[in-house]
Image (tube, grey):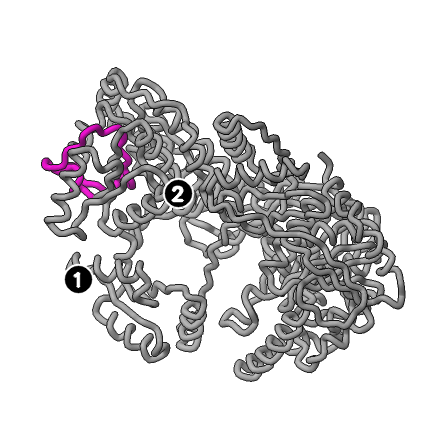
Amino acid sequence: MKKLKRTEIYQKHTHFESIIKRIGNANADKLQIKNLLASSKSLLVAAVGQKTPNTHLVILPDKEKAAYFFNDLQNVGNFPEILFFPSSFKGSITQFLGGKMDSTNIILRTETLNKLVSGQKNMIVSYPEALLEKVVSQNDLSENTLTLKVGESLGIDFVVDILVAYHFTRVDFVYEPGQYSVRGGIIDIFSFSNDYPYRIDFFGDDLDSIRTFDVRTQLSIARFDKVVVIPNLQIDSDDKKYLNFFEFISSDTIIWTEDTPFIFDQLDQLLGEAEKYLKENNTKIIKSIPVNEKNTQKLLANFTVIEIASQSFFDSSNNFIFDTTHQPNFSKNFGLLYDDLLSHTEKDYRVVVFSENEKQKERLQNIIESKNKEKEQQIIIEYSSNEELIHEGFIDHDLQICYYTDHQIFERYHKFKLKNSNLQSAKEHISLQELNSLSPGDYVVHIDHGIGQFGGLEKIMVNGKSQETIRLIYKDKDLLHVSIHSLHRISKYKGKDGIPPKIYKLGSGAWQKVKQKTKKKIKDIAAELILLYAKRKEEKGFSYSPDSYLQHELEASFVFEDTPDQNTASVAVKQDMERAEPMDRLVCGDVGFGKTEIAIRAAFKAVADSKQVAILVPTTILALQHYKTFSDRLKDFPCTVDYLSRLKNSKAQRETVNKLKEGNVDILIGTHRIVGKDVVFKDLGLLIIDEEQKFGVGIKEKLKKIKLNVDTLTLTATPIPRTLQFSLMGARDLSIIKTPPPNRYPIITEMHSFSEDLIRQAINYEVGRNGQVFFIHNRVQNIREVEALINRLNPEARTAVVHGQMEGAKIEKIMLGFINEEYDVLIATTIIES
């Protein structure tokens, strides 16, 4: 089904032609559309946008709503350009990150301005904080634009002079916008107008070729005959003229607003806060922030404005009332869902479910088919293509359509997707950013030649051509030159602090011997354990039944979208459980990548076949966290979850042990306590071990006996070499989850000199958004002084201290208090790692 068909539906609405005519009427510049709910708004905007020659600007109350609206337009619209116009700041300018600009956001803003100047038809989505900032005039934008064409005769020196005038920074290798590098007849430029940097190749003074490339691999992506290089237009300059965004766009732009009174209030409030912020912080970011325009509503007087909300701001006789309702809240009750679908299909409503995941569609279809058999009915629903998605489902009673989303049906979290930043460095090898930060003498590992010392960058002649290389120094001053195109073969050395590594002589074969010796030792360790696993393979295990209706329901109710790796691992675990031989699978993935959800699904599969599950964790705090997670996920299913740890008194522990023995506990979570002699399972079918490497030898010996004929699932973020090598050799099955959840927020790391103001602002920001703070201070001697400092700077923040010299019970009590949000700031040594 083509994308156009979704918007064609609204082009058939009785109000549609009237709206188009009113927009074209010079006397009808203010329209009000009421009772248009959820994603029906974005579908109507897309439909109108397709039938009008104008540029459209959609203003939503905040960034989140704007981002979801933008995604809807991308997925169902058919527009030449759909652009997102964000604020250039990472956070609000009134927060402690004020003034910290985000390169990705600046690229998006610059892209929007550049497209508007081109004069083509655009669809732009924005929000008050983004519109608060001024933009350069169209004349200044043209003057600060460098156009490069293949075949032009410019000369490298001329281009460099322009880049210097544009405040670009010269570096050895570009890795973020605003940088350029020169190597022989090649200039690399990272413009603020593109996600990828340009590589400009000159032949003498003639521009020979232009291509984009990946900063991580240095490989070319695409070729161009013409490109535009634009600097950071948000940097203040006395010789630039700044305009309000409404002054920048053309007068025939159609403006859509949702909740206009609130947007105007937001703009005025933000403006006041900006003035206060600028005054208190004595910042120079003045020209780009409109400190003198508290009359945005006057700026809209000359535009056609269409309000899509129940509350209107402008007086207008051009009112259009639609008949839509929100998608019902089924609370994961599939009986209610089925009855609703049956009711609407009997009234000849068209029912479409929007989902981007084939597995999710399959789960829903299985549930519908099960209900069809149970009720002896036949409901047929449509499914959207994986590319067609909307954020919020709705019912339009005029058009007799039900557009439902799977994430609302199953109460799963749905995250908006904005442009991905390509500024992230690859983890597997040294990044250009790391390379630029290396100092002579730093240790670097070459995969073929071993550990050497970084000797800087050097140009050498290769076949008569100058080539940029990295110089590595080995024993006896041996030199190795590594081409910039072989960065993937070197990595920064990571070892014990303060202990210099051994450096070998080039060509001696010593490094190869070390690698071979290490491999042999690993194999020797594994050989001892191979016998155990061979014996385990011979044992007869329990073969679990295929996924039941309840299993489908549990998996469909997961609040996040499964990543491809997570889905693959989940399927592999269930297939192992359905085989006759005992499962022994290692699931390896970073924190937050979805290992626990795989364990929950496996545990429920075992419980569905009347088997018990033991979950072994290294700490009492982790036991309690897992208990809460499992209990919450399985609260709507016939499953009893309990835990054993020091947090329970002796009487409560005895009660749990007795219920376990009688079979009244399905899933037991605990520390090493659950392998005690008094803990007896009635029918143990699955053992889940979290972070196996943190358990001692004694516990592992006990586990060997349990694991002989019981399915075993091991979860880890950091597998020990023996465990990982064992999996790679095939003695244990291995699943790796290396795909992060979609739109996972990146970790932002910033380095600053010690500043009490920065500490106060950072803590106030986190506490103000109901967040919490880890304050790491790795000196026990004066850690209480640090707590006193924080109490002085942030008197309202609740603080607690944890360090390794405290009693274990006290540490647990404080950590539990922090987890339960009894404290805002936890001042701790690196003990929090464990």
Visible residue check, residue 429: no
Is 564 drawn above or below residue 789 in the view shown? Answer: above
Of circles 2 and 1, the one toward us is 1
Farthest bottom residue in view: 279
Q: Amino acid at mark 1?
A: Met
Residue 652, position in %: x, y? 14, 48
The residue singled out by tag 1 in the image is 806
Q: Earlier in the sequence, mark 2 or mark 1?
A: 2
**Quarter of the image containing the N terminus?**
top right
Residue 543, position in %: x, y? 32, 20
Residue 261, position in %: x, y? 66, 72
Q: Is 344 in the magenta?
A: no
**Residue in the picture at 45% in, 33% down:** 552
Choose between 747 and 14: the one closer to the eye: 14
Label 1 packing within 10 angstroms: few (<14), some (14-19), many (20+): few
Choose between 709 and 227: the one closer to the eye: 709
As drawn, is 735 to the left or to the right of 91? left
As drawn, is 533 to the left or to the right of 40? left
Residue 317, position in %: x, y? 81, 68
Q: Amino acid at mark 2?
A: Ile
**Residue in the picture at 63% in, 47% down:** 390
Label 2 packing within 10 angstroms: few (<14), some (14-19), many (20+): many
Visible residue check, residue 169: yes
**Residue in the picture at 83% in, 50% down:** 51
Label 2 secondary element: strand
The residue singled out by tag 2 in the image is 451
As drawn, is 750 to the left or to the right of 10? left
Q: Quadrant of residue 800?
A: bottom left
> What is the magenta range?
671-699
Q: How far, Cα to Cα, is label 2 from label 1?
A: 40 Å
